Image (cartoon, coloured by chain):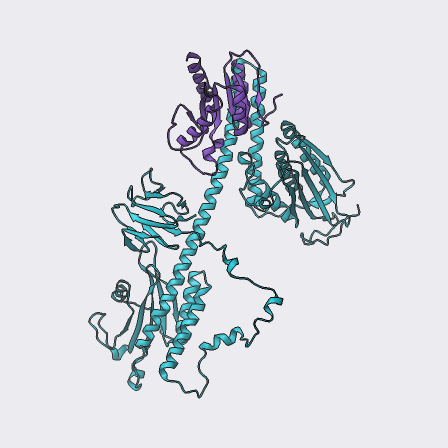
C-alpha cells in the first residue's frame, strides 16, 4: 500500500536506466492514476502532494519529467490569476535548480486562461483527459530518450 | 491599497487594485484593467501612480474620460471620485491616511491625572443645544429679516436631519415633501427623479395638502422641466403674469391663479431630479384678497437649498444600493468560483477513475479496474457531501428533533472516517460517555456537523507524526448540555484565524476544503440552540467542542427548542 499525501513517495525500484516521472499534485486521484498507469508501463514514478516536497524529492530522484499542478506554483500564490508564462518560468526555474546538468521537462496542469508557455514547459488545460496527459508524458519521455 | 471599483457597467462588482506604477484602462485584452464595454476604447485611459497620488489621464479615447461628469485630460484622483468611461462608472478609493500616530497625539488620561486640571463649568443637554434654532420667545424684539433667517435655518437643519438617516429613496422623498408642506402653503407637490435608464424625469413621490379637494392631475409643463434641468435653475411661475416663455395662461378669472415653484435637485455630480410644488388661489378669493401671491423669491431660495440637500441624500442612497448590489454580485461570483473549483476537482477525480477502469478493461486487469472503481466511488461521495452541505446552508431549516442516541451517531462518523484516517496515517479513536440516555435532536444534522469537524481534524493531522484524533461524547453533570468533543494533535490554528474560519468559503485546507464544512456545522448547532467552541494551540493541536442543550425525549414537543431549562434525563 502506498502512503499518499505524505512527504512523497517513490515506487518501483528498478535499474537506474529506467525513465522517471515526478507528479506533484494535491489531488490524490491524479497521483494515484498516474502512478498506476505509468508504473505498469515500466516508468519509475514518485509523487508528492506539496510543492516543497516535490522540489526536495526532485533533488534525490532526478526525474526526466515533472508533472506539476499550477495551483502549487509560486507565482499563483496570493494571486487569483497569473499569466501562464510567469507560472511556467517560475516552476521551471525551481525544478531546473534541482538538477542543473540535466533539468527535467515540465508539464503544467492548470486553468490559467491566457498566455502560452514560455520555455519548454508543456501546458495542459484543466479539466484534462488522463489519456492525453499520459500521452504527453510519454512523448516527452521519448524525446529525452532520443536526445 | 487604492482601487477602482466598477459600480455601473458590464463589469459591475469588479474591483481593480491599483498596485502598479502605470495601469491602462481599456477594452483590449492587454489592458491592465480590461473593461467589457463596447463604448470603451481599446486603450482608453491610464492611471499613473506617484507615491500615494494617482493621476488619471485620457489616452486619446474616442468618447472621452470623465471624473464626476466633467471631461478631463489629466487629473489627480481623490477618494470618492467617480470615473466614467464609456458606459462604465468606476469608483476610486484610496486607503485612509495613516492614523497610527493618533495615539501619540491624544491621551485619554485616568481620573487621578484629569481631576485637578479642569472642572465642569456648565452642562447642556442635547435638547437645549438644539434650541439654538427655536423661534424667539414671544415679545422679543427681532427684525423680520432675522426672524426669516432663523426660520430658514431651522428648515434647513430639519431637512438635514430628515435626509441623514434614510436609505430607502421613496421614504426619503416622502419626508422631503412633508417638510416642504409644513413650511410652505403649497397645495400639491411632487418629486421627479432622473430615471437611470431612460435619463427622463419620472415622478417618484406625490403629496397634496389635506383638505385640498381638487382631484385634478398635476400637469407640469415640459418646457419648465427642461428649463430647470438644463439651465440648472429654479423657477417660480404664475399664470397670472403672462410670460412668453411658459405656456400661455388660460382665463385666470375662470380657473384662479396657479403659482408653482420648480427647482432642480443638484447633487455632487449631476442633476438627479426636480421638485415641483404649486398652489391655486381660487378666483373668488383672489378678487377679495389683498395679497395675491403665495410664493415669493424667499421660497424659491429655500426650495433650491432643500432640493440640493435632498439630491445629496438621493445620490448617497443610490450609491449605497449600487454598492450593496455590487457586493452581492461579488459574493455570488466568489461562490460560483469556489463551487466550480470543487466540482472541477471532483470531475477530474471521476475522470481519473474512469480512465483506470478503461485501461483495466483493455488489459483485463482486475486490480486496475478495482482501483479505478474505488476512485469513482470516493468522488461520488465527495459530490454528495458537497450537495448536502450546500443544501444545509442554503435553506432555513427546522431541525428534525427525534429521539436519537448521540453515541451511536458519533460512533458511525468514526467508523465512516476510519479509511480516510488510515490513508493519512492518522489514528482515529472514539471515547463515548457511558450511558447517555436517548435525547431529542436532529440525528442527520448532527451526523453532518460531527463528520465535518472530524474530517477537518484528520486533515489537520496530515504530516504530523503520530497524528491522532479522539472523538468523545459527554453529558454535562447538570444534565443540561450535551457535548461532542473532537480533539486532535495536529497543526493547530492561530488565534486570529479561529473566528475567520467559520466564514463561508474560507478554507485553510487549500484545494481540499470547500469552505462550507465549518459554517454548515455551526449552523446546525445554532439550530439546536447550541454552538461550536474552539480551543487551539499552534503546533499542539485543537479541540472542537460541539455543544447544545439536552432535550429530554419526554419534554413537551411544544417547548421552545432553544430552551436551556428543558428537563434533562437522569443519566
Q: Is residue B118 left or right of residue B62?
A: right
Q: How many marks?
A: 0
Is B120 or B254 nearer to us in this picture? B120
Q: What residue sits 57% from the left and 40% below the top?
A: B389
Chain B colour is cyan
Image coords of residue B562 (percent x, y): 67, 52
Vertical placement of residue B194 versus B382, above or below? below
Image coords of residue B397 (percent x, y): 59, 47
Q: Residue furthest left?
A: B244
Q: What residue sits 66% from the left and 50% below the top?
A: B529
Image coords of residue B442 (percent x, y): 66, 44
Q: What residue sits 31% from the left and 69% below the top?
A: B262
Q: Residue furthest right?
A: B570
Image coords of residue B437 (percent x, y): 77, 43
Q: Is residue A6 left or right of residue B148?
A: right
Q: Is residue B20 left or right of residue B409?
A: left
Q: Is residue B215 visible?
A: no
Where is the C terminus of chain B found, in terms of image quarters?
Answer: top right
Chain A colour is purple
Give the quarter of the image for residue A87: top left
Q: Is residue B288 visible?
A: yes
Q: Is residue B260 left or right of residue B520?
A: left
Amino acid at each position: 500500500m502506498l502512503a499518499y499525501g505524505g512527504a512523497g513517495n517513490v515506487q518501483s525500484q528498478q535499474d537506474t536506466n529506467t525513465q522517471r516521472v515526478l507528479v506533484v499534485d494535491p489531488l490524490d486521484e491524479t497521483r494515484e492514476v498516474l502512478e498506476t498507469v505509468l508504473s505498469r508501463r515500466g516508468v519509475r514514478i514518485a509523487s508528492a502532494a506539496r510543492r516543497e516536497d516535490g522540489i526536495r524529492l526532485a533533488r534525490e530522484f532526478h526525474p526526466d519529467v515533472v508533472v506539476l499542478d499550477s495551483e502549487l506554483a509560486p507565482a499563483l500564490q496570493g494571486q487569483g490569476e497569473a499569466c501562464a508564462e510567469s507560472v511556467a518560468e517560475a516552476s521551471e526555474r525551481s525544478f531546473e535548480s534541482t538538477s542543473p546538468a540535466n533539468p527535467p521537462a515540465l508539464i503544467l496542469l492548470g486553468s490559467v486562461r491566457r498566455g502560452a508557455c514560455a520555455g519548454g514547459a508543456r501546458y495542459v488545460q484543466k479539466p484534462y483527459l488522463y489519456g492525453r496527459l499520459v500521452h504527453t508524458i510519454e512523448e516527452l519521455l521519448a524525446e529525452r530518450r532520443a536526445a | 491599497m487604492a482601487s477602482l471599483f466598477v459600480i455601473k457597467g458590464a463589469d459591475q462588482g469588479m474591483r481593480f487594485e491599483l498596485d502598479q506604477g502605470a495601469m491602462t484602462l481599456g477594452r483590449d485584452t492587454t489592458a491592465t484593467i480590461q473593461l467589457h464595454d463596447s463604448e470603451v476604447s481599446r486603450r482608453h485611459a491610464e492611471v499613473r501612480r506617484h507615491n500615494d497620488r494617482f493621476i488619471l489621464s485620457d489616452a486619446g479615447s474616442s468618447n472621452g474620460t470623465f471624473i464626476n461628469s466633467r471631461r478631463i485630460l489629466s487629473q489627480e484622483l481623490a477618494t470618492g471620485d467617480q470615473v466614467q468611461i464609456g458606459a462604465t462608472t468606476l469608483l476610486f478609493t484610496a486607503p485612509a491616511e495613516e492614523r497610527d500616530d493618533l495615539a501619540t497625539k491624544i491621551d485619554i488620561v485616568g481620573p487621578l491625572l484629569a481631576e485637578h486640571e479642569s472642572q465642569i463649568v456648565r452642562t447642556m443637554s442635547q435638547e437645549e443645544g438644539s434650541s439654538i434654532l427655536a423661534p424667539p420667545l414671544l415679545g422679543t424684539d427681532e427684525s423680520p429679516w432675522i426672524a426669516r433667517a432663523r426660520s430658514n435655518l431651522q428648515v434647513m437643519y430639519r431637512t438635514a436631519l430628515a435626509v441623514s438617516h434614510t436609505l430607502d429613496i421613496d421614504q426619503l422623498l416622502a419626508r422631503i415633501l412633508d417638510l416642504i408642506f409644513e413650511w410652505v402653503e403649497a397645495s400639491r407637490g411632487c418629486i421627479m427623479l432622473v430615471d437611470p435608464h431612460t435619463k427622463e424625469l419620472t415622478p417618484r413621490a406625490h403629496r397634496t395638502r389635506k383638505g385640498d379637494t381638487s382631484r385634478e392631475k398635476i400637469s407640469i409643463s415640459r418646457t419648465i422641466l427642461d428649463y430647470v434641468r438644463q439651465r440648472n435653475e429654479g423657477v417660480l411661475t404664475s399664470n397670472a403674469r403672462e410670460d412668453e416663455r411658459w405656456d400661455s395662461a388660460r382665463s385666470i378669472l375662470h380657473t384662479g391663479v396657479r403659482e408653482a415653484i420648480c427647482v432642480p435637485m443638484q447633487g455632487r455630480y449631476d442633476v438627479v431630479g426636480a421638485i415641483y410644488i404649486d398652489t391655486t388661489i381660487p378666483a373668488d378669493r383672489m378678487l377679495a384678497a389683498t395679497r395675491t401671491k403665495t410664493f415669493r423669491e424667499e421660497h424659491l431660495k429655500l426650495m433650491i437649498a432643500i432640493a440640493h440637500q435632498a439630491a445629496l441624500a438621493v445620490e448617497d442612497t443610490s450609491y449605497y444600493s449600487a454598492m450593496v448590489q455590487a457586493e452581492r454580485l461579488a459574493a455570488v461570483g466568489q461562490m460560483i468560483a469556489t463551487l466550480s473549483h470543487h466540482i472541477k476537482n471532483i470531475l477530474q477525480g471521476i475522470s481519473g477513475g474512469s480512465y483506470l477502469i478503461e485501461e483495466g478493461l483493455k488489459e483485463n486487469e482486475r486490480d486496475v479496474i478495482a482501483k479505478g472503481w474505488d476512485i469513482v466511488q470516493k468522488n461520488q461521495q465527495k459530490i454528495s457531501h458537497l450537495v448536502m452541505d450546500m443544501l444545509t446552508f442554503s435553506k432555513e431549516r427546522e431541525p428534525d428533533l427525534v429521539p436519537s442516541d448521540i453515541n451511536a451517531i458519533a460512533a458511525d462518523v468514526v467508523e465512516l472516517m476510519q479509511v480516510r484516517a488510515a490513508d493519512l496515517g492518522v489514528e482515529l479513536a472514539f471515547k463515548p460517555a457511558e450511558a447517555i440516555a436517548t435525547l431529542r435532536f436532529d440525528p442527520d444534522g448532527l451526523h453532518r456537523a460531527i463528520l465535518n469537524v472530524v474530517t477537518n481534524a484528520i486533515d489537520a493531522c496530515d504530516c504530523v507524526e503520530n497524528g491522532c484524533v479522539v472523538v468523545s461524547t459527554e453529558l454535562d453533570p447538570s444534565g443540561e448540555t450535551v457535548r461532542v468533543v473532537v480533539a486532535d494533535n495536529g497543526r493547530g490554528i492561530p488565534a486570529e484565524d479561529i473566528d475567520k474560519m467559520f466564514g463561508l468559503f474560507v478554507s485553510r485546507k487549500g484545494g481540499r476544503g470547500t469552505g462550507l464544512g465549518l459554517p454548515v456545522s455551526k449552523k446546525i448547532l445554532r439550530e439546536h440552540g447550541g454552538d461550536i467552541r474552539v480551543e487551539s494551540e499552534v503546533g499542539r493541536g485543537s479541540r472542537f467542542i460541539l455543544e447544545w442543550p439536552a432535550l429530554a425525549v419526554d419534554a413537551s414537543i411544544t417547548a421552545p427548542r432553544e430552551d436551556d431549562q428543558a428537563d434533562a434525563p437522569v443519566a
